[in-house]
Amino acid sequence: MGYYVTLEIELEVIENFLDKNLELVDVELSSICKRDEAGEFPHPDDLSNALFIPIEREAIVIRAVFHEINALIEWELHNLALEPFSKSARYAKARKADSIKLVHDLSIGEVRQLVEEHYKIELYNLPGAIEIESIRKTVNAFKHRKGFKDPRRDSCSKIPERFEPDRDEAYKVIKGARDFLRALWEKTDFKL
């Protein structure tokens, strides 16, 4: 299991990464707007082209925050599942070295089940759990469907519809992850 202080530092690094990159985007957008006011973009397409790169960079930064938070949460859940996994007869059946199953080979659903059963907690009831689930859905949509929602599982107002996380959501998921990890560690008897 990781140390809570280390996790807090990792969250601060992610938040700092978001802050600094958004500051750079804002400076660049401001510069482009000043250039537009000065008449440097005679054709509307010129302005659109100039805005494209900083706007796309912002989207990439926000997605990176979602990916990093998701990886951090899954890492911590896998670490918490290590003890119940090692005691479980269900996973101890391998006879050959190449068929040994490690805790990090388990699906996140199996990991959640191990953690919930071992620590007698409901992960979905912890503070920040809603944000954590939102992160997973968003990350999986970008990983598997270039950001498009799955109309069978995600609420969609139209088809096709994309997840389009914004700055506010990025900060909310960092806070949600912080709340979730703190509650998770309290429920698993780690003394903060």
Image (cartoon, helix red, strand yellow):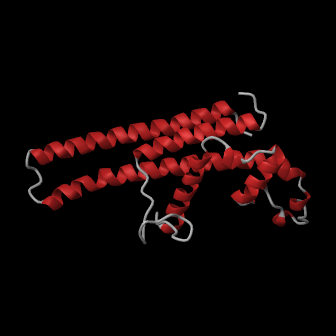
Q: How far across and down, in percent of the image, does residue 86 sit?
A: 86, 51
Q: Residue 104, image x and y in percent? A: 73, 55
Position of residue 105 measured from the top left corner of the image (x, y, whole percent): 74, 59
Is residue 75 visible to us here?
A: no
Quarter of the image where one finds residue 42: bottom left
Q: Quadrant of the N terminus?
A: top right
Location of the C terminus (image quadrant): top right
Residue at position x 90%, y 64% in the image: 93
Query: Hey, which residue is sitting farthest top in the picture?
Result: 192
**Residue 70 in sight in this render:** yes
Residue drawn at 58 percent across, 49 percent down: 130
Residue at the location (49% across, 66% down)?
A: 149
Question: Which x, y percent locates residue 25?
Answer: 32, 44
Q: Is residue 180 left or right of residue 162?
A: right
Using the image, determine if residue 156 lies above or below residue 36: below
Question: Does residue 56 appear to the left or right of 65 in the view shown?
Answer: left
Q: Is residue 181 left or right of residue 190?
A: left
